[in-house]
Image (tube, rainbow, N blue to C red):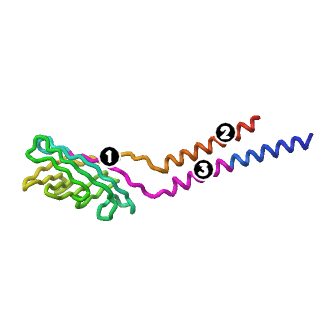
Amino acid sequence: MLQVIIGKYLTIMKKLIQSFSIIGTVGLTMAILLGNRPANALTFVFSQSGWDGEAEVIGTFSGEDTNGNGIRSEENEVSAYEMNFLAGNSTFNDFTHNFADLDNLVYDFLSNTVTIISTSSSSYFSQGLLNRGFIGQDGDSLTTDEPVNVTIKEVPEQRSWKALVLFGVGAYFTRKIRTKFVE
């Protein structure tokens, strides 16, 4: 009788240790995947209004803050850029700038401000002299006192779904082991 009780006790302990090792393995794997991930590129949407004739600037840029000082194009942290000037009722023409037209871009995470200098036949400075926006075209210019609005566009990370799958597999095996305890 005592041998049967000890045998059942050892079987239960063995299954308990197995379940803890599965949970520990899944937890360690998730910690490695999520804890040591590098900085990921983010996509930002920006806009600036307040221009004469109800004109508007809208655009996006993508970047990765590799050194922790904000995103800066001169440090090759900006990977994509596009800006559209919608002239509205102003005397200016609509125009678009892309990455090739970008002269300088600095995004500060702490103050949520972006400074963009984009030049071609039409120029755009998001925060120029006296913190004012500036559009130049054919020798004429428009200015605005409105700040640039910047929001982060959520981009799902590739590793997030992997961690979710690992968590699901761990939960499945843990449940399977627990149901064996009840039997």
- The answer to which of 177 and 49 lies nearer the viewer is 177
- Mark 2 or 1, nearer chain start: 1
Q: Is residue 69 magenta?
A: no
Magenta-tinted stretch: 21-48
Quick one: SS at disc 1?
A: strand
Q: Quadrant of the N terminus?
A: top right
- Residue 65 lies in quadrant: bottom left
Residue 12 drawn above or below residue 133:
above
In-image side of 127 versus 176 (left or right): left
In the rendered image, residue 10, in percent from the top left (x then y), is placed at 82, 46
Query: Residue flagged by tag 1: what amino acid is it?
Result: Thr
What is the distance, in whole Å, between disc 2 and disc 1 at their CAs? 41 Å
Residue plotted at (55% across, 45% down): 165
In the rendered image, residue 152, in percent from the top left (x then y), is placed at 35, 47
In-image side of 33 versus 152 (left or right): right
- CA neighbours of label 2 inside 10 A, class few (<14), some (14 to 19), many (20+): few
What is the distance, in whole Å, between disc 3 and disc 1 at their CAs? 33 Å
Q: What numbered label is drawn on residue 151?
A: 1
- CA neighbours of label 3 inside 10 A, class few (<14), some (14 to 19), many (20+): some
What is the distance, in whole Å, between disc 3 and disc 2 at their CAs? 15 Å
Q: Are marks 3 and 2 in contact (CB under 8 Å)?
A: no
Query: Residue flagged by tag 3: what amino acid is it?
Result: Gly
In the rendered image, residue 35, in percent from the top left (x then y), is placed at 52, 55
In-image side of 28 versus 56 (left or right): right
Residue plotted at (34% across, 53% down): 109
- Residue 175 lies in quadrant: top right
For mark 2, what is the residue?
Answer: 175
- CA neighbours of label 1 inside 10 A, class few (<14), some (14 to 19), many (20+): few
Residue 103 drawn above or below residue 134:
below
For mark 3, what is the residue?
Answer: 27
Quick one: SS at disc 2?
A: helix
